Amino acid sequence: MPTNHDNTALIADRALVKRWLDRVPAHEAVDAARAADYIGKIKALLHERNAVLVAHYYTDAALQALAEATGGVVADSLEMARFGAQSSATTLVVAGVRFMGETAKILSPEKTVLMPTLEATCSLDIGCPPHEFAAFRAQYPEHLAVVYANTSVGVKAISDWVVTSAIAVDVVEHLLDQGRQVIWAPDKHLGRYIQRKLGNSDDIVLWDGACIVHEEFKTRALLDMQQLYPDAAVLAHPEAPLAVLELAAVVGSTTQIIRAAKERSEPRFIVATDHGIFYKLQQQAPGKEFIMAPTSGEGATCRSCAQCPWMGMNTLQALYESLLHGSNEIQVDPALGQQALKPLQRMLDFRAQR
Ligand code: SF4
């Protein structure tokens, strides 16, 4: 059996997360008048700069509402990038985390890509530095590298496929059917889920990374919650631990979770993904009840939670200042961007053929 790379200590750096949480609370306490003032100014600047706001499902509800109100989009990371590429705007303002801004720039190198902050990153991205991933890859020269979108441009550039959670199982299955072996990085929980779904753990080597938000969901507390709400279905993102996923009625990407909430008949849902998604869930499935899956319980290190500290750094004020000054522009080395585009394009082509 291959030995997994061990970078758990880096990913589990709670102190780092706490620093971010202390610095910028997930729900910034901006009073209503100030928020309205920012929103008015942001709308005017978007118009002036021929810019469009592209927001992730996990950002604050105010930003998601603003994106919708100004002709932008609220979506998962791939849809954000695709929307940006197809938009006639010359500037994309990406509210999310850094790899999302980079992906937008890779797909739209001719456009200016701004972010409310360049400090918003992701534990999966941090935990998979390009030079370490290159060394890991070199141990498996026959394997294809399939990486999650939550990686830096440097990691994408040395990979064969970039995939999102919505399509990860299909792509890996396709490659195994061709007799290939794969390296999956960086999320080990999603990797284990793929192994379990495909009934194959020998041909899929896992990098040892995790999302600090999703890995906090707790199985026993979730079982207790299910007792309390027997009519509720659990909707879970595959970045959560396998034991949590086994309790879920639906395991899927953010977009798939929203669709399930709309289409399923249950009156209430227990949701195991970032709390930011509640804005879209309530909008798309009004009248249904959504309950946050528990992140506390025996052995828990986090009672938060379910709120990504980096997503929380996207505030109205930061967005306004970025647009005002044209600051926090995403730069991607053109040659590296070209390299990273290949595995991304492979996924887009694969999806288009399905
Ligand atoms: S929620 Fe997890 S996967 Fe998403 S950006 Fe935050 S740390 Fe990364």
Image: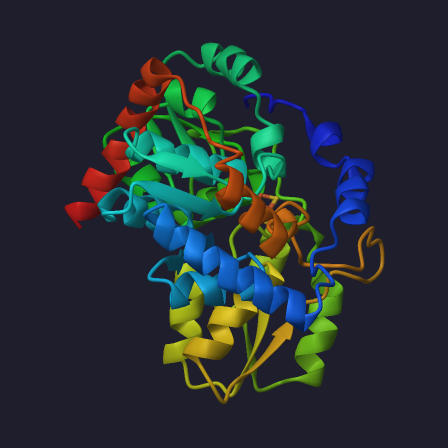
Position of residue 157 measured from the top left corner of the image (x, y, whole percent): 38, 20
Where residue 16 sits, quadrant-wise, is top right
Residue 54 in view here: no
Residue closest to the eye, 276 or 189: 276
Q: Residue at x 33, y 62 (%)?
A: 71
Task: Tally the numbered discs.
Answer: 0
Q: Quadrant of residue 200?
A: top left
Tell which of 41 and 213 is nearer to you: 41
Q: Is residue 83 above or below residue 153?
A: below
Instruction: Give the image location of residue 37, x and y in percent.
Output: 58, 64
Q: In the image, what residue occupies the spot 49% across and 27% down? A: 152
Extreme-left residue of the structure: 353
From where the camera sits, is residue 116 visible?
yes
* Residue drawn at (48%, 85%) of the image: 266
Q: Is residue 177 above or below residue 248?
A: above
Relative depth, front residue between 268 and 205? 268
The spot of residue 83 in percent (x, y) is: 29, 50
- In the rendered image, the vertical position of residue 103 relative to residue 181, given as above or below: below
**Rendered image quadrant of residue 12:** top right
Color scheme of the displayed model: rainbow
Which residue sits at x=47%, y=64%? 66
Horizontally, residue 201 falls left or right of residue 70, namely right
- The quarter of the rendered structure image containing the N terminus is top right
Q: Is residue 41 above or below residue 233?
A: above
Q: Position of residue 102 (x, y in %)?
A: 43, 32
Horizontal placement of 315 versus 190: left or right?
right
